[in-house]
């Protein structure tokens, strides 16, 4: 049997960019019964594995596996439950998936088990504020790390979405998170930042983040934008969650034109085409 460590695909975002010379697309697979976007469609292990491989075929450069919903008001799950949801998927994918696998978790023990099982990136929506051991786990495995801005927790993050200086606060928050990660030994070139669309922001705040992506470039890290199917698109268009593809593509395109390095999406095939065109229009190819 192949050793689990040998099945991990090293996360090197610079190499991904240089190899493909395109925007990195992270495809989302939720192994949860209460996801806002797909309503538990991939709660079954086999369905989740099949979807992950399908997203790779459609052009995903990374697949992101999550076992705990982070939608507003979501109910937290235990470490054991989260592991039961994601580890069987990761263990199968590790031997089949040709691209790096990310685990979307805020718990260090889940991250450790996932990295041991074959993941190579931790996507932490708390930016290391949820678990004091997370940075050390990421450093131990020499893994990639996504640091996201969120004020509060998913349970109450939308209670207060007013800011004196939204973009300035996000920049300061992510700067502190980067310093914390690097001081714990996380490799500087394996950190990506996410300003957190939909996490503690109102409609205008989300639009402001997308318009202001260039301001996050001062942090010196690749910028990930996750706007796919989110509620602000529904607010603007009137479309329900299952009918937000066009709005999601518009948001992804705008993000790329404004300087994003990567997008986290549910509809990979359509987004791949849109961001490839936007990347060329940006004049960086």
Image (spheres, rainbow, N blue to C red):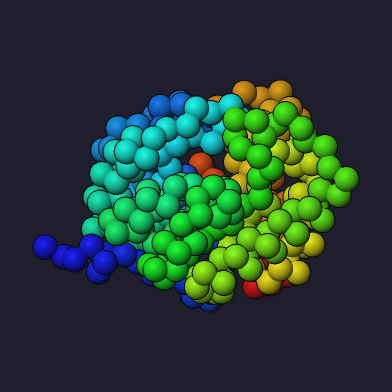
Q: Position of residue 21 (x, y in %)?
A: 56, 71
Residue 83 lies in quadrant = top left
Q: Is residue 154 above or below residue 272?
A: above
**Farthest residue, direction right:** 164
Q: Left of 32 or right of it: where is 251?
A: right
**Farthest residue, direction front:** 132
Labels in figure, total: 0
On the question of residue 269 being in view, the answer is no
Residue 181 lies in quadrant = bottom right
Q: Is residue 161 above or below residue 242?
A: below
Q: Which residue is pictured at 45% across the width and 37% down the height?
A: 68
On the question of residue 157 being in view, the answer is yes
Q: Position of residue 42 (x, y in %)?
A: 37, 34
Q: Is residue 89 above or below residue 136?
A: above
Residue 70 lies in quadrant = top right
Q: Which residue is pictured at 30% across the width and 50% down the height?
A: 90
Q: Which residue is pictured at 76% across the width and 49% down the height?
A: 209
Q: Position of residue 51 (x, y in %)?
A: 36, 42
43 or 117: nearer the viewer: 117
Placement of the C terminus among the 4 image quadrants: bottom right
Q: Is residue 283 above or below residue 64?
A: below
Placement of the N terminus among the 4 image quadrants: bottom left
256 or 220: nearer the viewer: 220
Q: Which residue is pictured at 58% across the width and 27% down the height?
A: 73
Q: Position of residue 247 (x, y in %)?
A: 67, 37
**Farthest residue, direction left:** 1
203 or 238: nearer the viewer: 203
């Amino acid at each position: 049997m192949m050793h689990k460590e040998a099945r991990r695909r090293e996360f090197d975002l610079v190499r991904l960019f240089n190899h493909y010379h395109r925007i990195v697309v992270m495809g989302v697979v939720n192994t949860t019964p209460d996801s806002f976007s797909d309503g538990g469609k991939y709660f079954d292990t086999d369905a989740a594995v099949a979807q992950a491989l399908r997203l790779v075929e459609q052009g995903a450069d990374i697949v992101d596996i999550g076992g705990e919903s982070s939608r507003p008001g979501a109910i937290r799950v235990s470490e054991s439950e989260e592991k039961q949801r994601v580890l069987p998927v990761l263990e199968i994918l590790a031997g089949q998936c040709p691209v790096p696998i990310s685990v979307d978790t805020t718990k260090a023990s889940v991250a450790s088990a996932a990295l041991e099982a074959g993941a190579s990136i931790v996507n932490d929506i708390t930016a290391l504020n949820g678990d004091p051991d997370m940075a050390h786990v990421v450093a131990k495995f020499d893994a990639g790390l996504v640091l996201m801005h969120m004020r509060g927790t998913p349970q109450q993050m939308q209670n207060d979405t007013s800011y004196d200086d939204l973009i300035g606060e996000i920049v300061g928050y992510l700067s502190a998170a980067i310093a914390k990660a690097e001081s714990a030994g996380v490799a500087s070139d394996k950190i990506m930042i996410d300003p957190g669309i939909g996490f503690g922001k109102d409609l205008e705040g989300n639009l402001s983040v997308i318009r202001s992506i260039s301001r996050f470039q001062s942090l010196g890290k690749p910028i990930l934008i996750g706007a796919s199917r989110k509620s602000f698109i529904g607010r603007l268009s009137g479309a329900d969650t299952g009918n937000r593809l066009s709005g999601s593509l518009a948001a992804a395109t705008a993000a790329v034109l404004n300087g994003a390095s990567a997008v986290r999406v549910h509809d990979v095939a359509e987004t791949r085409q849109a961001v490839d065109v936007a990347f060329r229009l940006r004049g960086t190819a």
